[in-house]
């Protein structure tokens, strides 16, 4: 493997881990942060909400910047900025500084996240993307599983500021590597058209309104402001669609936005992540409330899900090559839905563990297959936009799932009845999965990508 491919793979995997670990360890650190900085609960929540809105709003535009100027260059800027702002948060004197710097950190996070997929698309031929994406997915699973433990140890022994200093050294090393090891010249196309700034602004407004509204549903419920937020998001989206059809240099090129296969894969990521994270939200209350488990026992009971995701992702890459995206994804979504239903009926530790096992295996497989389809079916020169859309789906899905769960809980007077609906959400993804290529179509697409998009030169 060439030096460029090794750096691209390492940067993609470790960069994704840095971002995933940042979110999970912060959740553990927030109560201590609130106490030390004498902050309100709402202020502490904005340390997460501000970051999430900034990331979700800018991911696609950041992907377009990567397509234009080079994914490795954008990754270097993003990861170095992410680490520098993390250090700044560690020295923050008040919660206002923490919130403001978290928003800035979200901007840098938006720069680096699409680049982690864009670099893989540029470095590996389309028919070899499955395993690199699987390794990236496994690493995210490890970060999600170990984040609460790492965060707990750091906060207990060194305080909440340590969780932000954790990012600094890996970010510095990754940024320097990305700058030192040169990417092939074909990665960026600085002279190709103009940047669609109006389109980027419209998309940012639509996503910011959508994410802000959905994040507020668990706390405030469905109010007039919630409806207004969704209407504002829908209005901005309609104007965006009209603008994208008319502009000569759209933010989202037709080969990405007009592809039914890419659209199906993005829809699958939204529905699967909504089902997964909505279920995790419900399960955390069920295990500690109805089943009377303490936090440690609840975490251990859910551990099979994380293990299945970590170990199952490489297996998913093999299944993808052998059986194609359609059959593999349909089976994975069925497994995910079954896991949710098992948790709905479960009353003992063994059954709950089995439900989490199915949940993790199904979701990990969907992550690998749907992400591979999005990245593979986008032209190499649009890989950043495709990566941005993939990351956007993975940001919108979880907040949608939690909003669904809390809304259903208010109607049904309990969280458990939300689980069959979340299982149905995963099952809806099966309809989209039927639009994914089967094994023969997948091979034909790969051959076409190699001829027309330079995959064989990577």
Image (spheres, rainbow, N blue to C red):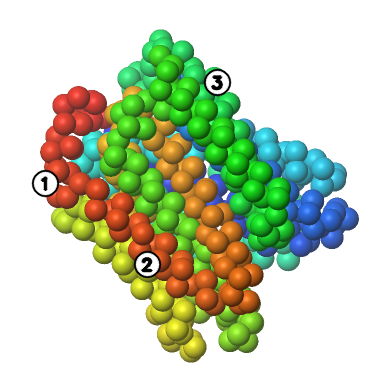
What residue is drawn where x is 45% and y is 73%?
Answer: 420
What residue is drawn where x is 78% and y is 54%?
Answer: 42
For the residue pair 247 and 310, the one nearer the viewer reads as: 247
**In front: mark 2 or mark 3?**
3
What residue is drawn where x is 75% and y is 43%?
Answer: 99
Position of 60 with respect to 120 (left or right) is right
Mark 3 or mark 1: whose residue is earlier in sequence? 3
Q: Secondary structure at mark 1?
A: helix
Above or below, comparing residue 177 to residue 219 in the picture: above
Q: Position of residue 347 (x, y in %)?
A: 49, 88
The reply to whether dot 2 and dot 1 touch (C-beta < 8 Å) is no
The residue wearing badge 1 is 440
The residue wearing badge 3 is 198
The residue wearing badge 2 is 336
Using the rendered view, name the quadrant where residue 205 is placed: top right
Q: Is residue 39 visible?
A: yes
Position of 125 with respect to 73 (left or right) is left
């Amino acid at each position: 493997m060439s030096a460029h491919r090794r750096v691209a793979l390492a940067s993609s995997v470790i960069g994704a881990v840095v971002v995933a670990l940042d979110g999970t360890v912060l959740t553990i650190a927030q109560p201590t942060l609130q106490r030390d900085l004498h902050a309100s609960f709402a202020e502490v929540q904005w340390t997460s909400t501000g970051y999430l809105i900034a990331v979700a709003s800018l991911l696609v535009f950041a992907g377009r910047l990567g397509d234009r100027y080079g994914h490795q260059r954008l990754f270097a800027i993003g990861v170095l900025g992410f680490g520098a702002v993390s250090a700044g948060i560690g020295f923050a004197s008040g919660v206002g500084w923490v919130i403001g710097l978290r928003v800035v950190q979200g901007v840098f996070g938006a720069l680096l996240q699409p680049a982690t997929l864009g670099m893989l698309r540029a470095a590996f031929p389309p028919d070899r993307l499955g395993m690199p994406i699987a390794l990236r997915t496994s690493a995210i699973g490890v970060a999600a599983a170990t984040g609460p433990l790492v965060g707990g140890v750091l906060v207990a022994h060194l305080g909440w500021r340590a969780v932000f200093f954790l990012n600094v050294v890996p970010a510095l090393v990754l940024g320097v590597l990305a700058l030192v090891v040169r990417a092939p010249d074909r990665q960026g196309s600085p002279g190709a058209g103009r940047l669609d700034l109006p389109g980027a602004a419209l998309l940012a407004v639509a996503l910011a309104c959508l994410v802000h509204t959905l994040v507020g549903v668990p706390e405030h419920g469905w109010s007039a402001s919630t409806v207004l937020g969704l209407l504002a998001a829908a209005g901005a989206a309609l104007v965006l669609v009209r603008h994208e059809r008319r502009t000569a240099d759209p933010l989202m090129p037709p080969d990405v936005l007009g592809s039914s296969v890419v659209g199906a894969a993005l829809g699958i990521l939204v529905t699967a992540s909504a089902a997964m994270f909505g279920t995790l939200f419900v399960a955390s209350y069920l295990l500690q409330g109805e089943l009377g488990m303490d936090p440690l026992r609840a975490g251990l009971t859910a551990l099979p899900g994380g293990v299945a995701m970590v170990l199952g992702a490489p297996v998913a890459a093999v299944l993808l090559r052998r059986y194609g995206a359609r059959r593999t994804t349909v089976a994975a979504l069925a497994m995910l839905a079954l896991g949710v239903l098992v948790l709905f009926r479960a009353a003992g530790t063994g059954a709950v563990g089995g439900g989490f096992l199915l949940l993790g295996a199904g979701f990990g497989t969907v992550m690998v297959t749907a992400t591979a389809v999005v990245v593979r079916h986008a032209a190499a020169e649009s890989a950043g936009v495709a990566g941005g859309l993939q990351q956007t789906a993975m940001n919108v899905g979880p907040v949608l799932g939690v909003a669904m769960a809390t809304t259903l809980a208010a109607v049904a007077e309990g969280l458990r009845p939300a689980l069959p609906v979340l299982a149905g959400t995963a099952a809806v993804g099966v309809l989209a999965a039927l639009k994914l290529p089967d094994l023969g179509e997948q091979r034909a697409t790969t051959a076409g990508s190699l001829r027309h998009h330079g995959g064989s030169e990577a």
